[in-house]
Amino acid sequence: MKTTQHIILVLLVLLSCSCKKFLEQQPSNFIPPDADLSDPKVARAIADGSYQYLQGFLQGQPSSYGGNVYNLMEFMTGKSNSDLGQTGFASFQNLSYNATSFYFDTWWQRLYMGIGACNLAIQNLPQAKVTDAVKTNMLAEAHTLRALYYFHLVRMYGAVPSVTQVPKDLNLNLPRTAAKDIYDQIIIPDLVLAAKSTLPWSDKTGRVSMGLVQSLLADVYLTYAGAAINGGNQYYGLSAAASKAVITQGGYFLFPEYTDMINPANKNTGEFIFQVQYAAAVPSINPLTPLTIPNYAGISQYSDEYGAVYPTPQFIASFPAGDKRVQERQFFYTKYKKKNPAVDTITFKGPYIYKWFDSSAVVSTAKSDLNYTLYRLADVYLLYAEASNRAEGAPNADAIEYLRRVRARAKLAPLPAGMSQAAFEQEVWAQRYYELCFENKMWFDMVRTRKVHNDVTGAWDNFVGHKTVFGATFAEKNLLFPVPKQEIDVNPKLLPNNTGF
């Protein structure tokens, strides 16, 4: 199938090239397929190949001006708008998308390319002539990243082909494997294996750490316990244990200010547990700054200011009164100095996203040096609060404290004592919405909980039947994305497609 062909091409590339520096995307040395694995640098290069397709989480969409796979996860929530018709936004706004719509094929391909790179590392690293500890940790990196790629796949598409070995040829038409089996046979075993390694709890170079392993386990177990799999109450306890380990052993801390998260000097430190690596000094530049600047605002050095994604006014209005996160230049902004003349200020038609605003790139370089965050401590605080509340039937003291810390940074008043399990859970869900908005988390929370916050009424609607502010209504079919038609065209074993497609 086409995806398998992509994987094999990836493997051939990875077998024949290495990176001079971890952050660099372009190969600068070449390693033949029969490279000597007694050289630790060769082994390290093969392990680093597992990271190459993490930048697929911000992959541009071919033939779409302002199109990026990031857009999809925000458009689907019904809490985002766009200045650009070329992004395909309208089909997600009215939920008329299909198996040929933007983003579905690019997400699928990039995630499988990442899986292929991990499979190559898992196959070759056992032959590396390095110490057992080094080998174990490099394998843990590859297994963790494979679990991460598959975790995204099953949440997006449900049943997907199981590819755990390096393909020998192109004669592979693989059927789909049930999502539960992907969890049971790949995702959870990969992470449990990685948890037995001696990876450090944090890693300032941006590589996989034990902090990521346990954060991902916490997320996986919470999702597995939830509606998509209904794995059982014990998985809430496992999720809580994993997130608690990150909190108590990881050495992470909340940044004092929200704007600390858009300071490139803070990459891979403090609150950040795991980020996709970008650097302004090399070809791999984070695209989110121009993507979220208002369309043709004339405030930056970028030749294109896309305005591809911005919040609905109803979502902004749903934040609690006094919430610091909606104050100017915290998570959002409504005005900025024009580039020419610099003394003038332009006021936008509404709030735009400030979470990805790299001031140096805007003012001078047009090359954002920010990383893209996949896990940070506030996320893990909230994972623990939700999971432990479910596991124990009520919020414990730690859950209350971790939720308090998230709310306190937002300058919100303390919660009332004695909250019920249900009331506490809904507050955790709300804080996940507000704290992690526009970080590609909300859609997965909506699907996992089968609940959607109604920004107009303040109620928690059932997913199926929730009407968005655009007048579209979520149905059962919207819980999973369609398998891309171009994949089905070359591999009919992927049929039947998901419900409604």
Image: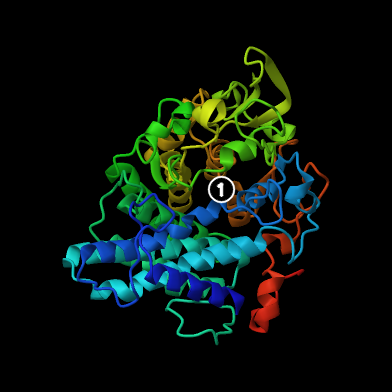
**Foreground of the two, 309 or 379:** 309
As drawn, the residue found furthest toward the bottom would be: 171
**Who's the residue at 60% across and 47% down the image?**
442
Percent x, y of residue 363: 55, 25
The tally of labels here is 1
Percent x, y of residue 173: 59, 84
**Who's the residue at 44% across and 64% down the image?**
147
Position of 243 compared to 357: left or right?
left
Where 307 falls versus 488 (above or below)? above
Where 454 falls versus 116 (above or below)? above
- Residue 233 can be seen in this image: no
**Who's the residue at 60% across and 68% down the image?**
158
Position of 188 compared to 306: left or right?
left
Q: Name the residue under label 1.
A: 441
* The quadrant where residue 447 appears: bottom right
**Foreground of the two, 426 or 394:** 426
**Foreground of the two, 420 or 127:** 127
Position of 87 compared to 8: left or right?
right
Q: What's the amino acid at mark 1?
A: Lys
Percent x, y of residue 202: 30, 46
